[in-house]
Amino acid sequence: MILNDTIVALATPSGAGAIAVIRVSGPQAIEIVAPLFISKTNKNLREQATHTLHLGNIVDGARIIDEVLVSIFHGPKSYTGEHTIEISCHGSQFIQQEIIQLLIRKGSRSAEAGEFTLRAFLNGKMDLSQAEAVADLISSENAASHQIAMQQMRGGFSNEIQKLRQELLNFASLIELELDFAEEDVEFANRDEFQKLVTRIQQVLKKLIDSFAVGNVLKNGIPVAIVGEPNVGKSTLLNALLNEERAIVSDIAGTTRDSIEDEISIGGIGFRFIDTAGIRETQDVIEGLGIKKTFEKISQAQVVIYLISADKFNPDASGQNSEFQVEIAKIRNQFPQKPLLVIINKVDTLDSAAQEKLKKDLENISSGVESAQYLFLSAKTGLGVEEMQQKLLQFVNTGELRNNNTIVTNSRHYNALLSALEEINKVQQGLNDNLSGDLMAIDIRQALYHFGEITGEITNDDLLGNIFANFCIGK
Amino acid sequence: MILNDTIVALATPSGAGAIAVIRVSGPQAIEIVAPLFISKTNKNLREQATHTLHLGNIVDGARIIDEVLVSIFHGPKSYTGEHTIEISCHGSQFIQQEIIQLLIRKGSRSAEAGEFTLRAFLNGKMDLSQAEAVADLISSENAASHQIAMQQMRGGFSNEIQKLRQELLNFASLIELELDFAEEDVEFANRDEFQKLVTRIQQVLKKLIDSFAVGNVLKNGIPVAIVGEPNVGKSTLLNALLNEERAIVSDIAGTTRDSIEDEISIGGIGFRFIDTAGIRETQDVIEGLGIKKTFEKISQAQVVIYLISADKFNPDASGQNSEFQVEIAKIRNQFPQKPLLVIINKVDTLDSAAQEKLKKDLENISSGVESAQYLFLSAKTGLGVEEMQQKLLQFVNTGELRNNNTIVTNSRHYNALLSALEEINKVQQGLNDNLSGDLMAIDIRQALYHFGEITGEITNDDLLGNIFANFCIGK
């Protein structure tokens, strides 16, 4: 970890825009930028107060590269904790590159991914779980993942861990102190108090570990498998779901997506739609493989939507639609616990008499299919779309989110918490068995180690390398 | 033109990045942001000095949207001349939208394209040609277009126009004054001096008008037609040309392009490559149409590259390659004046004996083809690529650029300059014919009008609408 050089990177998204921001951080940041910046009022950048803004030109010798606005931050009062300059230039890619190349020629180094935040961590501006939350915050695409990342970045999670760690550390010290007085057989650490703490730690760890199931799904989006043939209106349905949210943001720049994406935010929760083919009875080997794949996808999903088109719903003489029933039954057999929502799309293509008949037919048929919900819908007219969104939200446990509980979303934290719990359970066992202090101290130290992994007291270059490689450059 | 409301827009490119900047400008900018911003040090934004930076949270009631850095600019000391707040937030698209929507709910309006710069113009922070240069600067992709836009933004062009306009205005006033004393037959305006000024204006206008031919091409890229079949190595050649520049910027974020683009910057000048099919002799109607299209493309180009593959160059027994000769001759017949560069690609596929023979063959053949230049090249090994770049640069008149002359690139300016020259020529005619002052004054006023169009003294809502519609939102 080299901290004595000065790094530079584009901090805003790549591409052309009104403005772009280039960030320079390190001991020489001000020294490197000052000679390249001609202030409009002849101010010397070296003499300016922290947290001030200055208009001027970035020059390369006699050549003016751009008229820019320079922000100056004196370490440690900056994001990284080092001297930092932010250059706000015109958003031409050519200008961005010219300025970055100039800064590199004058002694800066091109920053690695996440290196600004790594420096913030190394300089004690934030702990490791907070640094990780910065990346989560930037990639947050909906209210749920945003809330979780924001809470983690503000230290909600690490505060809880830090507090437990401190208490455990106190007991560890007392127990280790006992070892120094082994001959005297004293107990500095009150075993009842210690038992209470261990129980409390077990409870907190279990709660955090359990929250990962929710957190992981909220962070990555709830997987929803849509079973149905291409012509039943899958993409129109996704569009209809998407438009509900898009309407709000339509007049804001940069929010338009070129194509329908698989992830759609409903009520602030991300849903990841997984397209599957139908699962019709077949003798065909290739189609058989398709069915196998569909079942694989359904097994990964948390919710299954079975989509049929109203105009293709043709019950036979006995009022049964065997094909439809067979498919639903198959899904139910394979995944008896998975929430299943049957959507009859394109109801707008039927007149009211036909709709009535369809409802009757469905009632007859569905009596044979357990625990599936039915919904009439027209992706075209929007009928039933809101109801579908409400049903999808019902499948998600948002209680933890609503109550602003700490939610674990990071698998690294999850693994550390599991390891910590394992060690704490050993300590509990030791207490039950009246284990000697020296053996117990080892398990406690092990638990402390795993706590420290989360917040970054315990770390190594490989771990940091892995974590910050997932950041974007410029952060 | 409404200026009494407060506008908001994302100023950085859309998409996710380390940070994003949201700009708020207008009389209420500080009033709108202040209640939404909780400073880390409990500072009230309303009481902060201009050009200062503040760390804190953007909140919507009790909910924290993001930890941000706020820049504050008091009008008229801002880009727009109005109170301006810039919010530097984490670069998540979700956060960007949440903050913009919050600001809109609290009384801002979503900014139109270019509205910040329009306000800067209307508030007298820059003239119209400078405002137009801002858009050119943002879209500049190479050193040439950057230099021209930068010069124009710094007022090089409008200063020249302003100065002439002022001198002409003085004479106009004197001549109009004469009209008030018409009975007394006085001449306040010295006709010799006036003749000198008219001559000078004619010279300057002609020079500026002439520069448009260069300027337009430098701004939009030099069109180069590549004639050759797909398998002669066109895309490898473009790649090789592109890589020369890419190598420099390869380690900088955001500079990687996913596909080879048609515009390539060589020595700071943009070249726009136009792919064409071959022009072989054919009886086929469809292929005949293809040839017609190729000729159309060649006619639009400023330089023609004829690309052949060394391994397909097979002169017949007489040492002639008739097909090749016929094609070159056709291009020459059709476009006798157009620079033609014949490139023999894939020379790496030949051994040295074969290369020697090829050279001899070519000498024989080329003696019959006038004014074409020949170049041996291997796009694969890079042999000849630099020489090709040098040759391409020779076709461009960069003298004006090197001498830092004022270059007109904007067709609106070009048309206004043409109209101004037309009027000035009428004034000249009037002087020659000893035209009466009242008639001459009309032509002078007309010329002044066209000068004013360029700098924006003369304008209207339609014109401004057209100009700023080409800007990006947030500028």
Image (spheres, coloured by chain):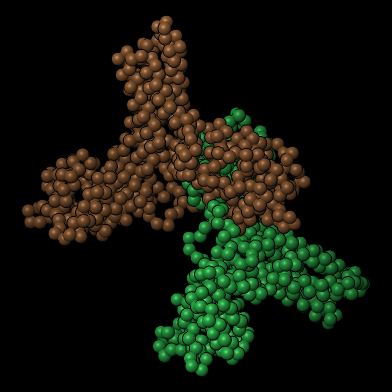
Chain colours: A brown, B green
Residue in view at x 49 percent, y 83 percent = B313
Image position of B338 (left or right of B65)? right
Image coords of residue B66 (percent x, y): 51, 37
Task: Give above or below for B360 relative to A336.
Answer: below
Residue B148 shows in the view: yes
Q: Residue at x 26, y 58 (%)?
A: A230
Who is closer to the viewer here, B353 or B461?
B353
Quarter holding the N terminus of chain B is: bottom right
- Front residue of B305/A95: it is B305
Judge from the rendering whether residue B132 lies leftward or rightward of residue A16; answer left or right.
right
Farthest residue toward the front?
A: B353
Does any portion of residue B212 appear in the rendered image? no
Q: Is residue B246 above or below residue B349?
A: above
On the image, the x and y values in percent for residue A377 come to: 26, 50
Residue at 68% across, 59% down = B150
Nearer to me, B76 or B439: B76
A115 and B69: which is toward the camera: A115
The reply, left or right, for residue A473 in relation to residue A367 is right
Number of on-image labels: 0
Instruction: Point out the residue furthest to the bottom here.
Output: B318
Residue farthest top in this picture:
A184
**Res B166 quadrant in image:** bottom right
Which residue lies at the image location 79% right of the left edge and 71% below the top edge? B201
Check the image and report above or below for B321 versus B172: below
Residue A142 pos. (x, y %): 42, 42
Q: Position of residue B176 (x, y in %)?
A: 83, 68
